[in-house]
Image: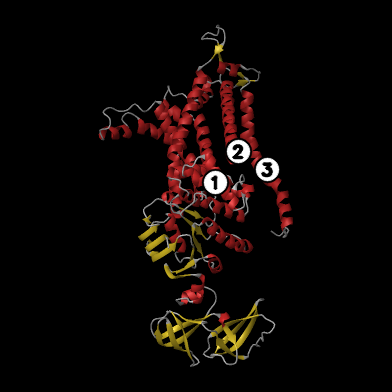
Amino acid sequence: MAGLPRDEAGTAASYASLARPLLLPTWLIIGVFLLLPVLLMVVYSFLTKEFRGGVEWTFTLAAYEQFFVTRGLFGDEPPSIEWTYIIIFWRSIWQAALATLLCLVIGFPTAWFIATRPPQSRGIWLFLITIPYWVNLLIRTVSLRFILRDNGPLNDALIVTGLIDAPLPILNSDVAVQIGLFYSYLPFMVLPIYAAVERFEFALSEAAADLYANRWQVMLHVVLPAVRPGILAGTILVFIPALGAFLAPDLLGGAKAFMIGSLIDEQFRGSQGNWPFGAAISVILMTLVLIALFIQARAASRGAS
Amino acid sequence: MDVAVSIRNAVKRYGATTALAGVSLDITNNAFFTLLGPSGCGKTTLLRMIAGFEAASEGEILLFGQNIVDLEPHLRPVNTVFQNYALFPHMSVIDNVAFGLRMKGVEIAARRAKAGRMLELVHLSALADRLPSQLSGGQQQRVALARALAPEPKVLLLDEPLSALDLKLRQAMRVELKQLQEETGITFLFVTHDQDEALAMSDRIAVMSQGLVQQVGTARDIYEVPVNRFVAEFIGETNLIDVEVTRVSDGMADLVLPSGQRLRCSSAATATGRHALSIRPERVTVTPDGQLTATVERVVYMGSDLRLLTRLEGGREFTVRIQNAARTAVPEPGARIGLKLEEGAARLLAD
């Protein structure tokens, strides 16, 4: 403290001179762990596949061609569109969107419930929401396998209560993937919406009710516009990781419910892999995500003006 | 006279605490009625019960004869001007004002026209397309007023609407609110803790304390003929002295002042014995042949008038306000003076 000038202008100036050295660790981390890997990925996607995994430093568009173009099983037919990967992408987007919607439908009332509890008990509810995160996602997803399998507790309970006669084949289906995605990302929807609802001024809903708005109209015209930023944030936080998820589809979906994450994962495994192709898929995925974020940012700024 | 709102034995309890301990009031149609009291007296609770934001624990609230206690807020034909305005931040001024009409199903052209007229009424037509965050506090206040008036409520509820404004604006708005009430002919039910506001605007005032109505009357009534110690002390400034009452009849009382002199004055008390006598500081003149004798302790210069802080013979403090006129002879501190009560200056209180 002794070295710092007392007057405010002097303090502000000394803070400004401190800004660069203080920001250095941040820049280093962003540079080494974010920019560099992304750059590496982009570069790799234009390189040639090496036989046992890894890359040869020869420029080629082969990886992108493999994604979009097919020349038949033996490579001797005229080029046509390769649908395999586009369909996997489409299914991933669809699954991620559905999971996001589910998280919103369940997460909004949950967040609302927590935010409208007395302040001293809100902490406990939030704590309960975050408890599963104390256990590794892999372990939780494997546990889901046990819960969902044919003779697991879920099917057992349904049979005992007489709701069904034979076990439902939930495991290894899109439904199981959906349950896994929903379960993994629900808190990412609840927390930002909670933050928005907690800031919401409830005098506004009273004012709307006073001006003849019924409950639904209050929700639609006053509450939703106010908590919209929280909903948008939650949507992004769920949709983007769900799009690239590979644990849930891998462990719960089986071979049929292949998603982008598993596809990329496969390209980097052992000698079967294809690093440039995996990198290319990642670049395409990232491009899609950036486009989605751009659209979202446009929507948010339109909502604000 | 038409009764707009009739409150019958309204009680509100929150767990063990009682916010309203049984209030009955009749509010005349087309009147400017004020609930006045310190914070925690139950005035806002009562207003919120009429709006429907708080359920009554007991009692009835009749709006033009119809019991509304079981109606949801959006079904009650009353509108509220909120303390912090509660304007919808994402809607323009005109959309805010038109909101009530929109919810009532009025089609867009008609409701925009009506909202426009309301903005004219509060002199804000030029700002119709702004957002609330782009307005000053005073302008937001007017928008809140226009928004609550637009659906033509049967009663307009105002919850301390002026408390967030600065003094000059508050004083200007007092006059404007009263004019607006007269122009629209809508019953205004105004809640405030500010006695100046209440006295300046109201046709009738209910003074509240500790969940009960202490007195209902015109501004003149509650100032000049307060019923009890609370009302006398809360409204304006007063001197209270203990007196012995010897006889009461027909609202008049005979009593003995501490000096031994006898006095006859109007009375809220109905029994003899010891009571408090309220004497307003401006209704006393300094003269050698007064009923009370006091020693001047301090003279406070207030501009338009002077305040003499004196001590009566018995040791009680007694404040006298005299006009700051050229002919006024100002006593020096330490001087012994006589105080003469003007005709009707004293009022015997019930407690």
Distance Cα–Cα, label 1 vs label 3: 59 Å
* Whether residue A77 is situated above or below residue A295 in the rendered picture: above
- Do circles 2 and 3 both sit on a common chain? yes
- Kind of residue sitting beneath label 2: Ser
Q: In the displayed structure, does residue B24 sit left or right of residue B132?
A: left
Mark 2 vs mark 1, foreground winner is 1
Query: Chain for mark 3?
Result: A
Q: How many residues crowd mark 2 within 10 Å: few (<14), some (14–19), many (20+)?
A: few
Callout 2: SS:
helix
Q: Is residue A22 above or below residue B298?
A: above
Label 2 resides on the chain identified as A
The local crowd at label 3, few if under 14, some if 14 to 19, many if 20 or more residues have their Cα within 10 Å, is few
| Residue for badge 3 | A24
Residue highlighted by disc 1? B114
Q: Residue A168, labelled with which disc?
A: none
- Residue at horizontal 31 percent and vertical 30 percent from the top: A151
Residue A197 position in % (x across, y down): 49, 46
| Residue that numbered label 2 is attached to | A301
In the picture as drawn, the residue positioned furthest to the front comes out as B1
Residue B158 image position (x, y, % from top left): 51, 58
Question: Picture quarter containing residue B290?
Answer: bottom right
Q: Quadrant of the N terminus of chain A?
A: bottom right
